Image (tube, rainbow, N blue to C red):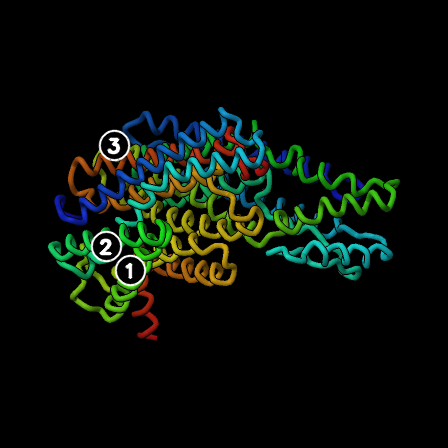
Amino acid sequence: MEIFLPIAFYSRTGHGLLIVLLIFAGLTGLSGASNLCRSAPLLSRTTLFLLTTVVLLFVAGFSGICWFHYQIFQQISLTLPPSFADMLNQQLVDMNRGAEYGLPLYRSDAPPRYLLPLWLENEKYYFWFMCYAVMALVGHLRLKNHRFRAALHLLLAVQVVILFLHTDPFLAPLPKFLAEVAPWFSADMPDGQRFGLFMRLYPKMVFYYNAQYMWFHPPLLFLSYACITMTFVASLFMLIKRDVDIEMLGYDFAKLGYFFLTLGMLLGYPWALKAWGPNWWWDPKICSSIMMWAIYSTYLHTRLYANKPAMWYFTSILGVVCFLAMVFTFLSSFFFPGEHTFVG
Amino acid sequence: MKKKGSLDFYLVLATVAVLFVISSICIYGMFYFKLAQIQQLAPVAKLDYMNRMNSVIAPFIIALILLLGICVPKRLLPALWLNRFAVALAVIAGGVSLWLGVKTGLVVVLAASLMLQLIVLALAVGGSQLLYFEKSGYWLRLGSSLVHLGIILFVLDLFFHQYQLLHLILFWVTTGAMVLGMIFCFYAQGVVQFIRARRRN
């Protein structure tokens, strides 16, 4: 694969950037930890500088991911010998007959290419945590409460540590995808075998990697996860103190998160029908997502009654439960078998 | 901020209770799926499991749809008439279910809800003061009406997913209604400011 893609360069540069990101996020986290324990703010300007740098580093890394995906688009195409095109198209026509959603026919002048979304495999964590970093910066700028800011910073540092230690998207970029397509580039593969491999790779390319829904369904959900994390921090503070500004900030992020979550889940529905047919019910990920949406809806409804002391605390607890449900939903892909499991 | 004890409040509580039960069944289903290794079973056994779970959850989904059916006319009717309407709807749905099956009964509830919600939406668009909303504001009411219309359409879409064209039309109308509804509902003030700025220019 190294002949076709600059994997080593991408990996080295990206991992180096992640080390710098870890250092800055670590300093932000340290400042957060000390501010959380103090009654007066400490190093406010420095913290803002650190936080802004973390956001910029995240954006720089994301630009790198975009570049790498562009390289994949340019360099990897499923090109078959011209003599195979007619036979393949005949087979595709036969396969498409009677199928609700068919595969596009092969064109020799424009062989299929991978237009990979930017949140594949470990990249999804990167995207998710980047969204949170931007939101933490917005929260930092909007509220003066130094302890609230500190909690946002601390959580950001935790996320970057997780990213660096467990889900680094640069260290071994897109391992599953590259392992899938690597056999395609073995030079000594007989034509018949290449044809068979094409028939294995092509449907997944069409229905998963290149699916339009892939550009909307996952990122909207990760945006909503970042919003839920913001609401979670606000809800924790609401449990400690009745601060209307923090509650408003939590509610604003909850509204935004609900918008992204609802739209993201809706856009997953036609995709699920297209890719799996109607038998997707009781898929653990979908069950837990609907559950999370229900809790989120409850949170937004109970928030209407938050003027009552009991409802204030109930709303706050629901904000925390929303976050726990989100963690549960996310982890369900790894623990519970189902249609979504392969994504993890 | 709302007063506790209103009909709205109890409908919200009832909805929360039903959603809680549905969520609990979902969690049970997830663990059972894992522990009983359903994915390893033959497709027939897997389908049997899904049908069994569907029958467990069905009463609560029906309760949720009925609650939706009651929540919609609460915008139009006073409490006494709302109670009468709820009883009438339940009786009609029960009768149709016995006669033509549960699925048809639920479609009747949804169709009634859809008709009423369209009336609510039309009145909200017209800025009618006849509607019973706990919150005031033209865009907020319009947004809330659209979100609820979207939910009804989405449930209808689930019923009709096997008709590809109808499903896609319903789906995109649902998505449009939900997106617009959430924007109007959550960002009513921003929408007003945006329109004022446009008018000024």
Disc 2 vs disc 1: Cβ atoms closer than 8 Å? yes
Q: Please say if the residues under marks 1 and 3 sit with CB atoms less than 8 Å apart.
A: no
Q: Residues within 10 Å of mark 1 (few under 14, many from 20)?
A: some
Query: Distance from label 1 to label 3 (Cα)?
Result: 42 Å
Q: Which chain does the numbered disc 1 sit on?
A: B
Q: Is residue B31 above or below residue A198?
A: above
Q: Label 3: state its secondary structure.
A: helix
Q: CA distance from mark 2 to mark 1?
A: 9 Å
Q: Is residue A172 left or right of residue B86?
A: right
Do labels 3 and 2 touch, CB within 8 Å? no
Q: Quadrant of residue B21?
A: top left
Pick the front one: B145 or B29 = B29
Residue at image mark 3: A239
Quadrant of the image containing the N terminus of chain A: top right
Q: Residue at x 50, y 30 (%)?
A: A336
For the point 71% across and 45% down, the residue is A201
Disc 3/disc 2 C-alpha distance (Å): 41 Å
